[in-house]
Image (cartoon, grey):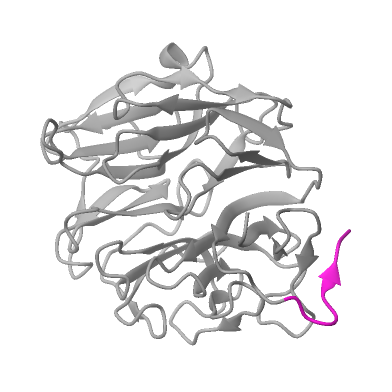
Amino acid sequence: MNGTILVGTAGQGILRSVDDGATWHRLGLKEAIEFDGTVRALAVDPSDPRRVLAGADVGICLSTDGGAHFQRVASPADGQTVWALAFCPTDPQLVLAGTGAPSRACMYRSRDGGRSWQTLDVELPEFCAGVNRPRILTIAFHPQKAGEAWFGVEEGGAWRTRDAGDSWERIDTPGRGINNSDIHAIAVLPATADAPAKHIVVTVNSVCESTDDAESFRCHPSKDRFDGLYYTRTVQPLDAEGRELLLAIGDGTPGSRTRIYRSEDRGQTWAQTLLNTAPNSTVWAFGTHASDRGLLFAGTKYGHLLRSTNGGRSWFKEWRDFSEITSVAWTPFVAPVHAHPQSIN
């Protein structure tokens, strides 16, 4: 594989490999992101694989060399912990970011690819019952409608905008069918010749699906569909049509058992994938890039990094263990290796 693997962690900042995982290096001592800091989110610009945004405990940071260096972008999120980042696939100049614990949960928008930011007008609670301070865990754009985007809060509900963030509507309201305000992941699948657009909202214990533009949802308890496992962590579309999906689930957080399921029919049915090494905790994050749909990564809460080279059908553990993995990304751009990298090998 030619490219750069980036692993965001709680406790080791960002670790990167430019030699297919043979060696790993932390960021240097003078980077905006501390080499022992926390990075909750990574997002690669779909229009330029050199540009990577990182959501850190210092705010929003930008790399223009594939993750070799990061600079903090001045924004209203300075000093806050950024938990989620997403580029709009149809307009990469449009980017959304969400913060959370220990910071206040807020949403931010960039109209210039992450160079400048503004605070969006959506009011979220300062505290909640389950995790004390809410955190925005997921942001998803509609792949066919540039103005439609979603975000989900643990705990604080599922929200949608139709005007690129100017206004927001809460979707998990009574009568719509979403059974829990603890939202872990959201995916929007495009309309195809034989299927309408589909909205998938993953709560802590269910997968909720809508095919009527989010007017109503059918929620399926995860323990009934996924071999008794309930802690539904994240969902990842794999192809442009939304036919192939991955879903990560475990028996809790951090958990002691986890599985990855794969669907080839837009989430109607799921099949367990092969994990050649039993992960040490719940799978927390997936890393993908459109340039190679076969190459995928997954990270666990307690630092196992898994790799698939066949589109997620089977997985092998990488030799290096990490601290808590919070996000994974890879870019086909090979980041430069400098004279004095912070090696962890």
Is 339 magenta? The answer is yes
Q: Specify the quadrant that holds the C terminus.
A: bottom right
Task: Answer with the quarter of the image where residue 97 lies.
Answer: bottom left
Residue 233 appears anywhere in the view? yes
Side of 151 relative to 22 (left or right): left
Is 236 magenta? The answer is no
Furthest residue in direction front, as rendered: 2
Q: Position of residue 77 (x, y in %)?
A: 47, 76
Task: Answer with the quarter of the image where residue 176 lies.
Answer: top left
State the residue at coordinates (42%, 12%): 224
163 versus 34 height, above or below: above
Q: What secondary structure prevails in the magenta region? A: loop
Quick one: 129 or 61, which is closer to the camera?
A: 61
Q: Position of residue 39 (x, y in %)?
A: 62, 63
Q: How many numbered markers are drawn?
A: 0
Q: Position of residue 167 (x, y in %)?
A: 17, 65
- Magenta highlight range: 337-345
Q: Specify the quadrant that holds the N terminus.
A: bottom right
Furthest residue in direction right, as rendered: 345
